[in-house]
Amino acid sequence: DTGVSQDPRHKITKRGQNVTFRCDPISEHNRLYWYRQTLGQGPEFLTYFQNEAQLEKSRLLSDRFSAERPKGSFSTLEIQRTEQGDSAMYLCASGSGGGGDEQFFGPGTRLTVL
Amino acid sequence: AQRVTQPEKLLSVFKGAPVELKCNYSYSGSPELFWYVQYSRQRLQLLLRHISRESIKGFTADLNKGETSFHLKKPFAQEEDSAMYYCALSGKTGGGNKLTFGTGTQLKVEL
């Protein structure tokens, strides 16, 4: 296991198109998080899964955003009708839970909306 | 609401000089604080967490609840310490531990 992986690493799309990103967490981790990072900012929480259940969504996650983790393993994040403001780095992290839970981050998917 | 503040966007020090990266937080409960680091062209990774009270790569951080601070310190900076450092606070959410990050401080260690 080489850690959390994300695909694609880069995505360029035109405004109005739909995009989907994939995250494969560390295999034994039951917790999965999505964050978004824009230039000059730290990562911002988007949503969290424990196994297949989506337990929290940030208000940053508008109706155009949807995330799934159908079998409690990999997760997908879809953005519909992309806008230029969606341009950012999308980070996935996984963890095993417990106090002081360390989150292991993937390399991120950089989205550019033209 | 929880918030993490890192007042310095860039900190430049000479090799061998002491380093202090500042972090202040606001949180109504009992916080769990972390420092994450991102080296050039690498992914974000955990450097240390306050509950471990450990020293990693010569770095330490003490949680000061009175001053709501969690400053990162190292007595002698090394060139390989040059990186982006993020302070983060963990708030319980539905059983999970979502992280609230500061805006980060770029540490540059000059020869």
Image (tube, rainbow, N blue to C red):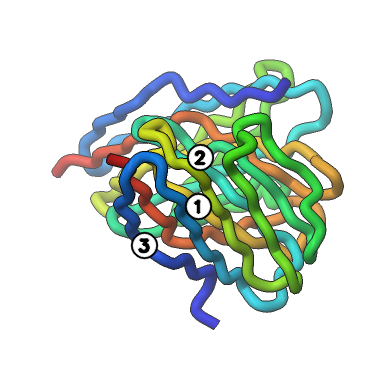
Neighbour class for label 3 at 10 Å: few (<14), some, many (≥20)? some
Which label lies toward us, 2 or 3?
A: 3
- Mark 3 residue element: loop
Q: On the image, numbered disc 3 is attached to which residue?
A: A9
Horizontal placement of B77 versus B110: left or right?
A: right
Q: On the image, numbered disc 1 is attached to which residue?
A: A91
Are discs 1 and 2 less than 8 Å apart at CB? yes
Observer-nearest residue: B73 or B3?
A: B3
Q: Identify the residue shown where x is 28% and y is 53%.
A: B40
Looking at the rendered structure, the kind of residue marked 1 is: Leu
Looking at the image, is A94 positioned above or below residue B38? below
Q: Name the subunit of mark 3.
A: A
Q: Position of residue B51 (x, y in %)?
A: 73, 47
Find residue A43 and name its label. Answer: 2
Q: Position of residue B18 (x, y in %)?
A: 35, 35
Q: Identify the residue shown where x is 70% and y is 64%.
A: A69
Looking at the rendered structure, the kind of residue marked 2 is: Pro
